[in-house]
Image (cartoon, grey):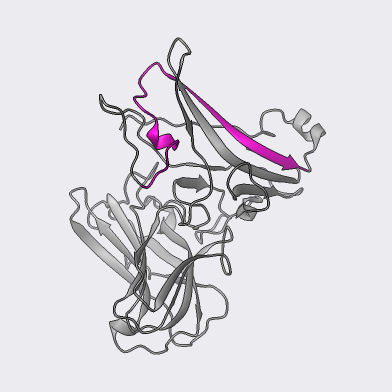
Amino acid sequence: MDLRKTMFFVVAGAMLFSMDATSQLVNINTSGGFEGSLPSYWTKGNEPSGSTLTWATDQSVSLGRSLKITKSATSDSAAWVSENMVDYWSERHFANVDMKIGAWVKTQGVNTNPTADSLRWYIAYTFYDSAGVLIGRTKLPIDQSVATSTGFVADTNAVGETVLPKDSWKTIISFVAGKNATGTVWADNFILYGRGGAWAGQNWNSGVGVPTGWTYWLPPNGGNDGLLANGFENTRLTTETSHSGLSSLKFDLPLNRQPHDAFVGTRRYLLTGTATGLVAPPHQAAGDISALLDAKAGDVLRISVWIKASNLVPDSAALYPVTWAVGFTPGFWKG
């Protein structure tokens, strides 16, 4: 996608059709709604009474959303905990690479100068090998020298602090408030890169702007801070308009942006089921792409999406008929 002129762009209600070689309809499945209440790759790991975990819209670095914890002293720690951040083209996080990891955080009214772990706020990256055995953990204390930060502040590890002795096949990120920690903290743009240009692998969805079931690649600004560029920093979930439900995804691409493509797409789903057909997990509604039954080699998969647009420039579309366009890039994996 390389749209060169200003546009208001909403994507909602992707459809996937499975058809056999004789073009008889086998299944019709609806996927691609943006109604999820949690960010993709993230779960509420612990939310004891006296704490509130919010997928927040009041503060953010990228994409209009952040993870937020507000709490008083509680019976246990409160935590957002990620799913496995090893995914897609980063099949693992690599050993013997000096990793830069961390997040952007903003504090408001937190307890200061903690003297025990139970009083601390922190970000943690935990790494496991292919057998699920713990490799190591890097814990990044959030600055509590003052109660309220001046905006978002980068919280990262030191040079040489995180060098894995083995490849990580599962990487879990946690955003934690100790049980006696108090106040409010927002976290966004969770990063994982190799320093000095070395390839360490990458975490997906460094920002938390899309709901469960979705992933994205939006062009970075050239740094390793998780910030976006080329107009895609304006990407947002919105309730301004929708085809179904309440929400849609909006690209707002300015007139003078530098050309670049990008995508927001569904995460991988298993399409081939057992002899009795693939059964969707209980938390996924009927009609989700993951409920597609017994897809097999030779089937034709047809994908479509509902789009609403404004401020399009017809002469640009005529001049750039391929790159001034929106399309699908389906990907297939053997396992």
* Residue at 55% over, 32% down: 328
In the image, 7 versus 155, the foreground residue is 7
What residue is shown at x 34% (from left), y 49% (from top)?
86
Q: In this orientation, which residue lies closer to the viewer: 157 or 321? A: 321
Residue at coordinates 71% horizontally, 28% vertically from top-left?
A: 321
- Name the spot of residue 326 as percent of width and height, x first: 63, 34
Task: Give percent across and percent down for residue 100.
Answer: 40, 62
Q: In this view, does 228 lie to the left or right of 39?
A: right
Residue drawn at the location 66% of the way across and 37% of the way down: 307
User: Looking at the figure, which quarter contains the N terminus?
Assistant: top right
- Picture quadrant where residue 38 is located: bottom left
* Total numbered circles: 0
Confirm whether the magenta stretch covers residue 96: no
The span shown in magenta is 283-310
Q: Position of residue 210 (x, y in %)?
A: 51, 52
Residue 134 occupies quadrant: bottom left
Q: In this view, does 34 lie above or below 13?
A: below
76 sits to left or right of 111: left
Residue positioned most to the right: 315
The C terminus: image quadrant: top left
Q: Picture coordinates of residue 228 (x, y %)?
A: 58, 55
> Would residue 4 be visible to someone looking at this image?
no
Quadrant hosting residue 165: bottom left
| 280, above or below 131, in the image | above
Looking at the image, can residue 93 be seen? yes
